[in-house]
Amino acid sequence: MGIRNVMVVGSGLMGSGISQVIASAGFEVIMVDQKMEYAERGLSNISVNLSRRVSKGSLPENEKEQIISRITTADDLHAGKHVDLVIEAVPERLELKKKTFAELDQMVQREAILATNTSSLSIASIGSSTKRPEKVIGMHFFSPVPIMKLVEIIPSIITDRDTIHAVEEFSKQIGKETIFASDYPGFTVNRLLVPFMNEAIYLVFEGNNPEDIDRGMRLGANHPIGPLELADQVGLDVLLDVLESMYEGFNDSKYRPCPLLKRMVESGKFGKKSGSGFYTYNR
């Protein structure tokens, strides 16, 4: 099937980023959130991001307006009843995602593909909440979505070939490169990356300086960004959610979240988006 119209569920950092990329590629997109004010805030963030590109000379002003015009905001999933693809980008909670998919299953056309932007949760489990599990698939985007080139595609064991092919082609049409991953907690990238960031947090927990840890990995391992800088950018709350789902999914202590990470999240220190994490940021 050809994908023409898309609905993105969620207008936060990931949802708005996904919507921006899709609209920039020439597709119509409906960005939905629980309240219209949330969706409008997401659209405002997209406008700010595009304005930065205009000011740098990398995007004409008229093109910015065209991109914005392709994004419709809504506070009701019924707004996407005729779309070809839904991309869910709600918080990383299995029960919330299953509830969202059960509702989507009742509201969008039967031929529509239902994709989840989960970074660690079971695609099969999410799909089991629908009557079309063969059309449920993982599309894991990376933050910041307009910059990061990868989409990790995760079929469940019953996702059909047409769905896989359609999502792969659509990902390429919106300018992304793809890899395929098996439906196990963390998939490929986070299976490697998240324990790495967690171990860096354990080093801080043991008394090491965050700047030294990050500088060590940049200079000693040629990493473009340190693990704690990256954790702040990803969001410490998101990182904790992923670790907890991997810890539960594998029942392996190597995925146990560092106690310091839990305390920071409990204190509202989520990283760059909250203005404070391992580093301090201007909001």
Image (spheres, helix red, strand yellow):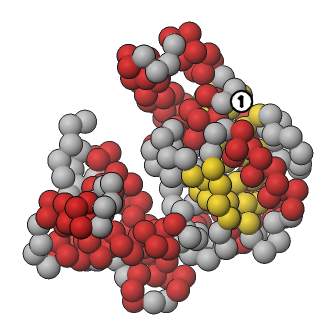
257 to 140, vertically: above or below: below
Q: Is residue 243 left or right of residue 117?
A: left
Q: How many marks?
A: 1
Outermost top residue: 62
Q: Is residue 233 left or right of residue 77?
A: left
What is the x, y in percent for residue 91? 50, 56
Res 84 → quadrant: top right
From the viewer's side, name the closer residue of 168 and 91: 168
Q: What's the residue at 77%, 34% (across, down)?
A: 5
If the image is split into quadrants, where does the N terminus sit?
Answer: top right
Q: Secondary structure at mark 1?
A: loop
Q: Is residue 241 visible?
A: yes
57 to 103, vertically: above or below: above
225 to 195, vertically: above or below: above
Q: What's the residue at 55%, 47% (across, down)?
A: 149
What is the x, y in percent for residue 94? 58, 67
- The 10 Å Cα crowd at callout 1, few under 14, some 14 to 19, many 20 or more, is some
Q: Which residue is mark 1?
A: 27
Q: What's the residue at 45%, 44% (across, down)?
A: 144
Q: What's the residue at 62%, 45% (across, down)?
A: 176
What is the x, y in percent for residue 107? 79, 45
Q: Is residue 95 left or right of residue 42?
A: right
If the image is split into quadrants, where does the C terminus sit?
Answer: top left
Q: Amino acid at mark 1?
A: Phe
256 to 162, vertically: above or below: below
What is the x, y in percent for residue 106? 81, 51
Q: Is residue 72 visible?
A: no
Q: Is residue 16 left or right of residue 139?
A: left
